[in-house]
Image (cartoon, rainbow, N blue to C red):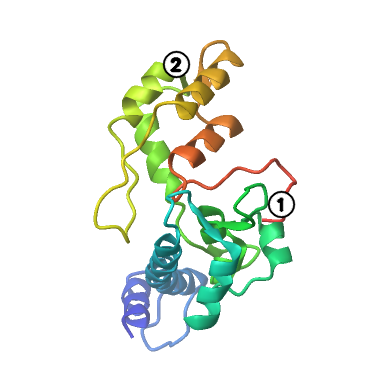
Amino acid sequence: QQAPALARTEASARPGHNAMETRYSFEDAHGIVGGITKSFASFWDSECRSMKASLVEMDTLHTGRVPLSKFYSHGLDAEWRFGESEEYLRELGALDETSWRGKQVIIPNYIQATSNCIISSEHYLICCVNDCNGVLDEIESRIGAASAEPSQILAVMGNLSSHTTTLEEEHELQLQGSLTSQLEMIADAHGGQVPLHGRLFAQWLHFAFPRECPFPHKTGAVAA
């Protein structure tokens, strides 16, 4: 009721508008739809958070991955979610088949998959928010450049922690060992600087924030 009322108010302010008419212009309709979709996007975000919370609860090793068997077991026992076939998960880029632990569902890749877009059309999408954007935005704002030395990135990352809505305490980042050496390898390949918008850094972010940042597959490797 609020949207049509708003449309009538805005329309009545335009020159030449007949207050007795019940028809809406394209601008009116666009405003109504925009208001509805914003409200619906907020609702869907709460569904996405709930979905992620369920997956994180199954990620006892903090790897950002859920064993495929546990993924399906939860889907059968609890709710309508988590019912995609193994083949479809592979097409979506949400299936990790490289681990000695067996096949696993990659949490952020699954959350970001088109199968979890409640509206998916040529012109409009309502999907789950990419939590990694907040991490990258924070890094970019503190560094203030498109690339940086590993030491700069590590200094910034030392002040960040991986936030998860389902955990009572934060999971502190472990920046020693392989994460540090991987970052230095990226820099060595780019003249001592790490490009913040390259695939290799996105991959590094995934391993630093495995529950927030999707694993970046090569272009064309996955369907979505």
- Secondary structure found at label 1: loop
Residue drawn 31% across the image and 40% down it: 172
The type of residue carrying mark 2 is Glu
Q: In which quarter of the image is the C terminus?
A: bottom right
Q: Looking at the image, is 147 positioned above or below residue 107?
A: above
Residue 59's quadrant in the figure?
Answer: bottom left
Residue drawn 39% across the image and 69% down it: 50
Name of the residue lying farthest toward the front: 100
Image coordinates of residue 142 in percent, x first then y, are: 32, 27
Q: Can residue 144 be seen?
A: no
Image coordinates of residue 205 in percent, x first then y, are: 48, 37
Residue annotated with mark 2:
149
Q: Looking at the image, is 187 positioned above or below residue 119?
A: above
Foreground pick, 41 / 19: 41
Residue annotated with mark 1:
222
Please state if 14 lies on the left or on the right of 100 as rendered: left
Residue drawn 55% across the image and 75% down it: 73
Foreground pick, 175 / 190: 175
| Distance (Cα) linking label 1 and label 2 | 31 Å
Foreground pick, 45 / 177: 177
Residue 158's quadrant in the figure?
Answer: top left
